[in-house]
C-alpha cells in the first residue's frame, strides 16, 4: 500500500500528532515510543526520557566538540512539558528523508505502518 503526502500536509499533521504525544505524556506520565523516535530523529539524540519529578522531557545529545575524550560527553537538554511546544516545532527539518520519516510516523498513527510514503508537489 502507498500513502501520498504533500509537504504542507505533513507539517500540519505533525503539529497535531506532537500535541497528541505531549497530551498523552501529561495524562499518563510516560513518553510513547513513537514520540521518542521522533525526538531522537530530530535532535540526533542518544536518549529521551520523561522526568516525572520536574515534569520535563530530557534529551541526551552527544557533544562532539571535544575530540580528545575517549568516551563521548552527553549534553542533556531539558524542556518543560507545558503548552509551549516551540522547542519541538523548531527541530523539524524539510529535506526529503526527514519528510518521509515524518510520513511514516503519521502512517503508524493511522495503522498503515507498512505503507510506502511518497511526497507529491
Image: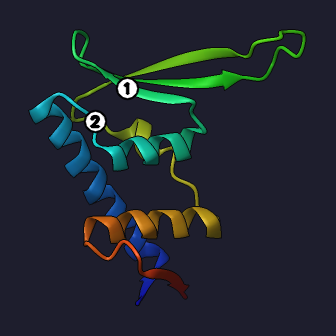
How many marks the image carries: the answer is 2
Q: Is residue 81 above or below residue 111?
A: above
What residue is rendered at 55% in x and 88% in y? Answer: 121
**Residue 61 percent coordinates (x, y):** 60, 26
Q: Which mark is residue 37?
A: none
Residue 98 position within the rendered picture, expressed as x and y whole percent measured from the top left: 58, 61
Q: Which residue is mark 2?
A: 31
Residue 93 position by quadrant: bottom right
Q: Residues within 10 Å of mark 2 (few under 14, many from 20)?
A: some
Position in image of residue 77 (x %, y %): 49, 20
Determine the secondary structure under disc 1.
Answer: strand
| Residue farthest along the front direction in this orientation | 114
Q: Earlier in the sequence, mark 1 or mark 2?
A: 2
**73 and 90: which one is in front?**
73
**Is 40 placed above or below 5 here?**
above
Q: Label 1 belongs to which residue? A: 49
Q: Residue furthest left?
A: 27
Q: Within the image, what quadrant is residue 99 found in?
A: bottom right
Say which quadrant the N terminus sits in: bottom left
Q: Are the residues flagged by discs 1 and 2 in contact, CB closer than 8 Å?
A: yes
Mark 1 crowd level (few <14, some 14–19, many ≥20, 10 Å Cα): some
Structure colour scheme: rainbow
Report the Cα–Cα distance between label 1 and label 2: 7 Å
Amino acid at each position: 500500500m502507498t500513502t501520498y503526502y504533500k509537504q504542507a500536509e505533513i507539517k500540519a499533521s505533525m503539529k497535531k500528532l506532537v500535541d497528541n504525544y505531549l497530551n498523552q505524556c501529561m495524562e499518563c506520565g510516560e513518553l510513547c515510543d513513537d514520540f521518542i523516535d521522533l525526538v531522537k530523529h530530530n535532535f540526533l539524540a542518544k536518549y529521551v526520557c520523561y522526568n516525572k519529578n520536574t515534569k520535563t522531557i530530557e534529551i541526551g545529545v552527544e557533544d562532539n566538540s571535544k575530540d580528545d575524550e575517549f568516551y563521548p560527553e552527553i549534553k542533556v537538554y531539558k524542556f518543560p512539558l507545558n503548552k509551549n511546544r516551540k522547542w519541538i516545532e523548531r527541530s523539524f527539518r524539510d529535506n526529503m528523508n526527514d519528510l518521509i520519516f515524518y510520513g511514516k510516523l503519521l502512517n503508524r498513527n493511522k495503522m498503515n505502518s507498512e505503507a510506502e510514503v511518497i511526497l507529491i508537489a
